[in-house]
Image: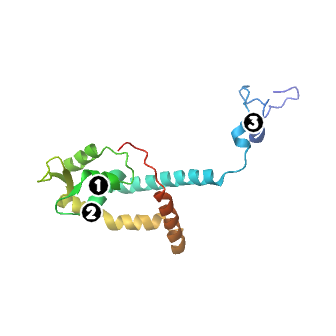
């Protein structure tokens, strides 16, 4: 309390970053020169994209819980389903098509194989080449999930008009085309 019997108020947010001000704990807050520049809409877009990604990822993770499968596991199954070939799909092709490429493909396929959804086969001409393909059970799982997943996607984007969804798809497609890999290949 001060000499007037009032509890001192902490400095407001605007004053906190100014040189010479003290925080509630009495520690001097250094000037924040990086915040003294004009607004950067690109930075706001990047933060919004990261928040949107986190939100959609969490939503999909909850969605896939009823099948006891992760978003990443379904992504692998989806790739094998869409790229279906009697000889399977090379593991490198699967890895290249993943949405999140940081996954350890060997362990992912081990897990999916243990669950009975995927099988790996060696190429007859070159035994070093390993291909993955869905088992009957894997096909049935993907087909069981597919329609509810489309409904979930529609629900997640239901606040957008059809033309806004097309515009968003085009803009995100352009952004994805600028992609720089952030992993070791």
Q: Position of residue 155 (x, y in %)?
A: 46, 66
Q: CA distance from mark 3 to mark 2?
A: 56 Å
Q: Position of residue 121 (x, y in %)?
A: 15, 52
Outermost residue, right side: 4
Q: Earlier in the sequence, mark 3 or mark 2?
A: 3
Q: Which mark is residue 16?
A: 3
Identify the residue under disc 1.
93
- Do callouts 1 and 3 mark residues in contact (Cβ within 8 Å)? no
Q: Is residue 106 left or right of residue 172?
A: left
Q: Position of residue 178 (x, y in %)?
A: 49, 56
Q: Disc 2 and disc 1: Cα gap in Å? A: 10 Å
Q: Quadrant of the C terminus?
A: top left
Q: Secondary structure at mark 2?
A: loop
Cα distance between the residues tagged 1 and 3: 52 Å
Q: Residues within 10 Å of mark 2 (few under 14, many from 20)?
A: some
Left or right: residue 130 versus residue 14 is left
* Residue carrying label 2: 83
Q: Answer with mark 2 or mark 1, whichever residue precedes in sequence.
A: 2
Q: Establish if 41 lies above or below 169.
A: above
In x, y percent, where is residue 138?
A: 22, 58
Q: Mark 1: which secondary structure?
A: helix
Density class for disc 1 (Cα within 10 Å; few <14, some 14-19, many ≥20) is some
Residue nearer the viewer, 185 or 94: 185
Q: Nearer the viewer, mark 2 or mark 1?
A: 1
- Total marks placed: 3
Q: Residues within 10 Å of mark 3 (few under 14, many from 20)?
A: some
Name the residue located 26 percent from the left edge and 43 percent from the top edge.
107
Residue shown at 20% from the left, 57% from the top? 133
Q: Is residue 29 left or right of residue 68?
A: right
């Amino acid at each position: 309390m001060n000499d007037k019997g009032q509890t001192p108020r902490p400095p407001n947010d605007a004053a906190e970053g100014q040189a010479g001000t003290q925080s509630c704990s009495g520690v001097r807050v250094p000037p924040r020169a990086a915040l003294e520049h004009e607004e950067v809409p690109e930075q706001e877009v990047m933060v919004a994209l990261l928040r949107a990604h986190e939100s959609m990822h969490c939503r999909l993770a909850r969605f896939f819980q009823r099948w006891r499968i992760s978003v990443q596991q379904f992504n692998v199954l989806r790739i094998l389903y869409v790229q279906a070939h009697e000889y399977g799909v090379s593991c490198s092709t699967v890895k290249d098509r993943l949405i999140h490429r940081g996954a350890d493909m060997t362990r992912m396929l081990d897990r999916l194989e243990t669950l009975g959804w995927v099988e790996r086969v060696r190429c007859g001409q070159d035994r070093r080449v390993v291909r993955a393909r869905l088992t009957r059970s894997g096909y049935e799982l993907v087909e069981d999930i597919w329609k509810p997943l489309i409904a979930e996607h529609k629900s997640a984007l239901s606040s957008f008009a059809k033309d806004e969804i097309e515009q968003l798809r085009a803009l995100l497609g352009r952004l994805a085309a600028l992609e720089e890999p952030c992993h070791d290949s």
